[in-house]
Amino acid sequence: MRRAPRQDTYLPTSQDRALSIVLAALRRDPGDDRSLGEWASVVHGGSERTLSRRCQRDLGMPFVEWRQRLRLVQALSMLQDGLTVQTVALEMGYSTSSAFIAMFHRMTRATPDDFRKRIVQASRGSRTE
C-alpha cells in the first residue's frame, strides 16, 4: 500500500495542455465516446500513445478508467436529481440501460435503483432529526 501512488481525488485533473482539453470536453459531454486516438488527433497532442502516457503520469490511471469514473460521478448526480435510468444511460453514452446498470453495479456494488432508495431513506432520516 505504501508504494502505491496516492490519489488525491476520485477524478484527478491534469495541467497538460492537450490532456486538459480532452478532460474539459468530456466533463461537458461525458457521453462523448471518442477514443484516445481520436482525441489525440483533435487536440494535436501527439499520438494516442503519448496521451496515454500523460494519462498515467498525471491522472494515475488509464484514460478509459478516468472516463468511466467521470460517467459514474455524473450519473450519481443525475440519478439523485430524479432522472430515469434510461435517460442517464443515454446521456452517459451507453447504448442500453442494461450496459449502464452493469457498469454502475461493477463500480458501486449497487444498482441505480438501490442508490436511489438509499437517497430516499437518507433524506427521510434527515427530516426526522
Image (cartoon, rainbow, N blue to C red):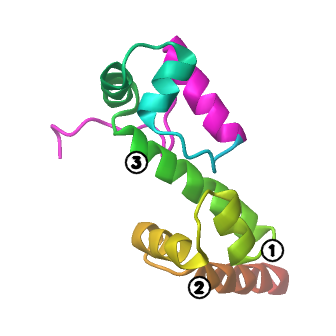
Kindly identify which residue carries mark 2. 114
Disc ID at residue 82: 1
Is residue 64 part of the magenta span, yes or no?
no
- The mark that comes first in sequence, 3 or 1, is 3
Q: Quadrant of residue 20?
A: top right
**Mark 2: which secondary structure?**
helix
Kindly identify which residue carries mark 3. 65
The residues bearing labels 3 and 1 have C-alpha atoms spaced at a distance of 26 Å
- Residue 96, image x, y percentages: 59, 73
The boundaries of the magenta stretch are 1-28
Q: Residue at x 55, y 46 (%)?
A: 33
Q: Image check: 97 left or right of 128?
A: left
Mark closer to the observer (3, 2) = 3
- Residue 115, image x, y percentages: 61, 78
Examine the rendering and report whether any part of residue 14 can be seen: no
Is residue 15 part of the magenta span, yes or no?
yes
